Amino acid sequence: MNPVIPHMTTMMTLVSVYRYLPQRGVRQGGDIPNRKARSGRRRQLLQFTQETILQGFRAQHFDLKHRIVSFISQKLFAHYTYTIRHGLAKGMRRKGGLGFVPISPGETAETKFLAEMQIDGRVVYDIGAFEGVLTLFFARRARQVVTWEPNPRNYGKCAENIRLNQLRNVTLNNRGISDKRGTIELIYDPLMPGAGSGEAVIAEQIGSTVRTARKLLIPVLTLDEDVEQSAFPAPDLIKIDIEGMELPALKGMAKTLARHSPALFIEMHGATPKEKVENGIAVLGLLESYGYKSYDVEAARYLTAATLGQYRPGHLYCTRA
């Protein structure tokens, strides 16, 4: 049996959406590809879909739909500016992505939790912003947002999206947060630029399985040091999404957590299911030593290092016990 067939519905749905976009998209910035370019991109998409199914390429962390959507977004609409039509940042301006498509991906446990979070008038730290969609969401309600994004490619996209929305309450930093000051190697997949990592096992996984992987050196320091040197306001909420670097980042913010007791919203990562469990145990144990309790957003229950077992945490909401 042809292994492409079980995924044909997903593939054809996305191709249909892609065909829709050039006909209905509003030309608000960037160029919509001409007929010849669209035909070539469709062939690329079909070839990419077959290769990614047959080879299991990038399959460890992303499903087929995610990879096809990212392919379309990166290859066709990276410079397209529009008003976001759904999601947490609905109504705001963005360059790149497919937020202008009139088909909502649906609400997840993560987005529902964030939408209900009380952040009005508060200070939010966004560590690992990617292109800044959550920064936009936070900035619409928070008093001030301090954002970190070390990848220059993503930093530029984030800065542009902040500019498009004329946000005056966002401070954007082009550096990473870790457990000590220095420089680390970040490796990322150009197809999934938000999933770059400096964590050794994940970085090796990307570098050894993605032939187009890119490497760069990024500056890092502790959050404690950065807050003190830059005189950032005390945080009420810290969101962390840094692809396996959660533990060193948390170690480097011990003083900030002790002094201000901010809530934490952490997306958990790991190179393999086993690594994700091990990372979860380590992170939960450290947070418990800081006096925090951790609520798993997807499972809707509190977790501890001692009782985690083989469960792989998704998103943790952590508060001082």
Image: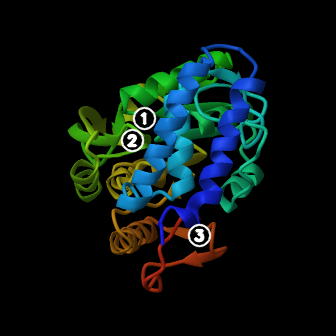
Q: Amino acid at mark 3?
A: Asp
317 with respect to 106 (left or right): left
Amino acid type at circle 2 is Leu
| 109, 192: nearer the viewer | 192
At which x and y percent is residue 31?
A: 61, 14
CA gap between label 3 and label 1 equals 28 Å
Question: Which marked residue is nearer to the observer: mark 2 or mark 3?
Answer: 3
Measure the alpha-carbon separation of dots 2 and 1: 6 Å
State which mark lies toward you, 3 or 1.
3
- In the shown orientation, is residue 15 left or right of residue 274? right
Percent position (x, y) of residue 44?
46, 37
**Helix, strand or loop for disc 3:** strand
Residue that appears at 39% across and 72% down: 273
Where is residue 10? Give x, y as percent: 62, 56
Mark 3, residues whose alpha carbon is within 10 Å: few (<14), some, or many (≥20)? some
Residue at the (47%, 57%) spot, across then down: 62
Quarter of the image for residue 83 reads top right
On screen, residue 199 versus residue 265, left or right, reads left
Dot 1: what SS? helix
Comparing 138 with 277, the one in front is 277
Taking the view exactly as shown, the residue that stands out farthest to the front is 1
Look at label 1 and name its amino acid: Val
In terms of sequence position, does the residue under pointer 2 or pointer 3 come before the other? 2
**Cα separation between marks 2 and 3:** 24 Å
- Residue shown at the point (71%, 14%) measured from the top left: 28
Q: Earlier in the sequence, mark 3 or mark 1?
A: 1
Pointer 1 residue: 227
Q: Is residue 61 above or below residue 217?
A: below
- What residue sits right under mark 3 in the picture? 296
